[in-house]
Image (cartoon, rainbow, N blue to C red):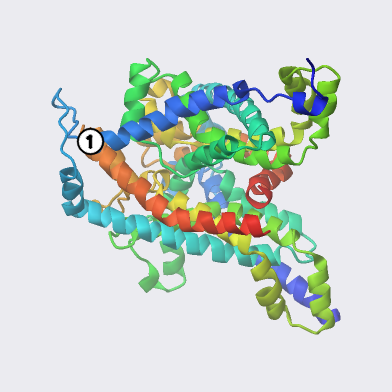
């Protein structure tokens, strides 16, 4: 009965069962049923759930708060993606040179990433409080009163403060991925370039950057998705305020759930899923193509 | 060559100078937590006129739900960690070894979970119907469902690097698939389990949104949310607030000092090699 050993190795389907059960019940099921409920008027004040179809989405789109939240979501996601990636590429390049205190510097620049967002939010409230905050103290002490702005209490600036906070907190993670990417690049390229007398900038431009592209793609993808889904970084800094000025889609989802407008809340959730899919699919398929080629 | 060395030293100096962006907020938290309320509210880096380390931290410790938060954080983190690592290791072994359409579908099916946001309302309703709402167990299950994809992503790359001959020889030696996994493969997964474990632990420990969404009972809140609860009571006493910030980030900071190499390498292993 027994075949040769090679074909006798079995990988029973039971290996995937625990993960699949938890994932299906606690993630896939609520996600899919959320899609359904986003076409209904499900709410806390009536027991009956009526199907309202795309009318729900018409209502959402006409809500001025939604327009603002959508704009903020994009602003936050794009600003943090640019900020995190530009700063961290520079840091990664510098922190892979022969510095004496290289490891200490890496540890320092990475460290904000290990703090929880509630703590970071409170630190930034202390930094950016318009009257007593540290940042405005600094500007006034330097005689740069013009720079002392309202920050988190200014409806025009609050979302940007949240972006800066996220860049401050998470650049270290992006940096670590770039450092690993740079370390994977063969030293031979740089030696050859040195023999040819290439200046540092050319080495960066023609060796580091092109060979770092896979890491750039993954970092951009991760930062964009993370930015689109952001809730904590807004909620624990400004709570979406002042007014609704720094509201993003996820904070609106939470707000409308609290108001008992369940169908409406799931509709906002679905819109966010669609946005994330539209932006990540091109990047993901590019990554897969690279994988096949590489 | 000499000028190159000089450039490097100069670069080093500049990088330490810019680290002020990191250190100044830390220092502000530390100094403020030692001051009296009046001085603390000024948010300056001045040396405190009186150092109230005992008085301030006594209040934080007694009223900041530090012990309660720590116990809750530990319970939730350990429970989630166990479930996530067990499920992901098994799943990724299957995905890495079985080469068919279903297996690669599975991989992308789980990776999708890293992209989509949680559906708040329906997840809440689900937990309610399972009697898991307001329970640490329910929250741990949500953490599991959102972090199994992440842990699997990290594991799969590593398992692919383990030679398949291992499976063959252990099968020849008479191991069934389960014995093979637990006795032969699991021990070899140890380095990546440490990495994945630290990352999952940090993710769960630092999270504040899943707990906020699905645990209304604040006696079950974790450390980050207890800072927020404490802040609600002492809105203007920043010496206490920053004391609470410092005290609750301390466990993670200590973990970071010990496991720094694993943490940084771990965060990158999945992304770069995966």
Residue at 39 percent across and 32 percent down: it is: B212
Question: Chain for mark 1?
Answer: A
Which percent across, then down, holds residue B245?
Answer: 51, 39
Residue at 44 percent across and 47 percent down: it is: A121
Choose top left, top right, bottom left or bottom right for residue A171: bottom right
Asked if one can make out residue A131 in the rendered structure from this viewpoint, the answer is no
Q: Tag 1: Cα neighbours inside 10 Å, few (<14), some, or many (≥20)?
A: many
Find disc 1 in the rendering and name its residue. A263
Decide which of A18, B245 is in the foreground and name it: A18
Which percent across, then down, holds residue A264?
Answer: 22, 39
Q: In the drawing, does residue B238 fall left or right of residue B120?
A: right
Q: In the drawing, does residue A293 fall left or right of residue A130?
A: right
Decide which of A238, B144 is in the foreground and name it: B144
Helix, strand or loop at disc 1?
helix
- Is A292 located above or below residue B69 in the figure? below
Which percent across, then down, holds residue B50?
Answer: 54, 43
Count of number-bearing discs = 1
Residue at 42 percent across and 36 percent down: it is: B209
Q: Quadrant of the C terminus of chain A?
A: bottom right
Which percent across, then down, holds residue A286?
Answer: 54, 59
């Amino acid at each position: 009965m027994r075949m040769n050993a090679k074909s006798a190795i079995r990988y029973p389907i039971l290996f995937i069962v625990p993960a699949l059960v938890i994932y299906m019940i606690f993630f896939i099921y609520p996600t899919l049923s959320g899609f359904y409920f986003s076409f209904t008027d499900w709410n806390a004040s009536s027991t009956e759930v009526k199907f309202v179809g795309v009318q729900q989405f018409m209502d959402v789109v006409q809500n001025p708060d939604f327009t603002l939240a959508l704009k903020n979501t994009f602003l936050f996601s794009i600003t943090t993606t640019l900020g995190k990636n530009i700063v961290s590429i520079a840091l990664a390049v510098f922190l892979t040179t022969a510095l004496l205190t290289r490891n200490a510097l890496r540890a320092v620049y990475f460290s904000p990433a290990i703090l929880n967002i509630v703590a970071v939010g409170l630190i930034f409230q202390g930094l950016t409080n318009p009257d007593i905050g540290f940042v405005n103290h600094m500007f006034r002490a330097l005689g740069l009163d013009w720079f002392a702005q309202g920050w988190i209490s200014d409806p025009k600036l609050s979302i940007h403060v949240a972006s800066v906070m996220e860049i401050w907190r998470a650049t270290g993670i992006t940096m670590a991925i770039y450092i690993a990417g740079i370390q994977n690049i063969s030293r031979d390229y740089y030696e050859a370039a040195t023999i040819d007398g290439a200046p540092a900038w050319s080495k960066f431009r023609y060796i580091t950057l092109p060979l770092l592209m896979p890491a750039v793609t993954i970092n951009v993808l991760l930062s964009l998705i993370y930015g689109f889904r952001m809730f904590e970084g807004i909620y624990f800094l400004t709570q979406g305020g002042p007014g609704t000025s720094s509201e993003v889609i996820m904070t609106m989802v939470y707000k409308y759930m609290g108001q008992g407008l369940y169908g409406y809340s799931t509709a906002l959730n679905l819109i966010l899923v669609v946005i994330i899919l539209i932006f990540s699919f091109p990047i993901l398929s590019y990554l897969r193509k690279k994988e096949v080629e590489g | 060559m000499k000028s190159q060395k000089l450039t490097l030293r100069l670069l080093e100096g500049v990088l330490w100078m810019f680290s002020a962006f990191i250190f100044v907020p830390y220092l502000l938290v530390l100094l403020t937590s030692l001051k009296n309320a009046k001085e603390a509210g000024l948010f300056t880096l001045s040396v405190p006129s009186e150092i109230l380390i005992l008085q301030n931290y006594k209040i934080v410790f007694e009223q900041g739900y530090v012990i309660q938060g720590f116990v809750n954080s530990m319970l939730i983190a350990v429970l989630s960690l166990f479930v996530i690592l067990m499920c992901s290791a098994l799943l990724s072994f299957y995905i890495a070894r079985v080469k068919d359409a279903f297996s690669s579908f599975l991989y992308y099916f789980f990776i999708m979970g890293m992209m989509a946001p949680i559906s708040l309302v329906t997840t809440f309703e689900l937990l309610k119907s399972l009697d898991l709402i307001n329970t640490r167990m329910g929250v741990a299950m949500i953490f599991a469902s959102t972090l199994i994809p992440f842990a699997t992503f990290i594991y799969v790359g590593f398992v692919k690097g383990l030679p398949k001959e291992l499976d063959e020889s252990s099968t020849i030696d008479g191991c069934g698939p389960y014995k093979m996994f637990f006795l032969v493969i699991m021990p070899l997964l140890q380095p990546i389990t440490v990495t994945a474990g630290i990352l999952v632990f940090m993710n769960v420990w630092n999270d504040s949104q899943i707990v906020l969404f699905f645990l209304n009972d604040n006696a079950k809140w974790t450390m980050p949310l207890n800072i927020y609860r404490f802040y609600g009571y002492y809105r203007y006493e920043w010496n206490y607030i920053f004391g609470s910030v410092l005290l609750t980030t301390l466990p993670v900071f200590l973990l970071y000092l010990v496991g720094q190499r694993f943490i940084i390498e771990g965060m990158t292993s999945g992304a770069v090699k995966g």
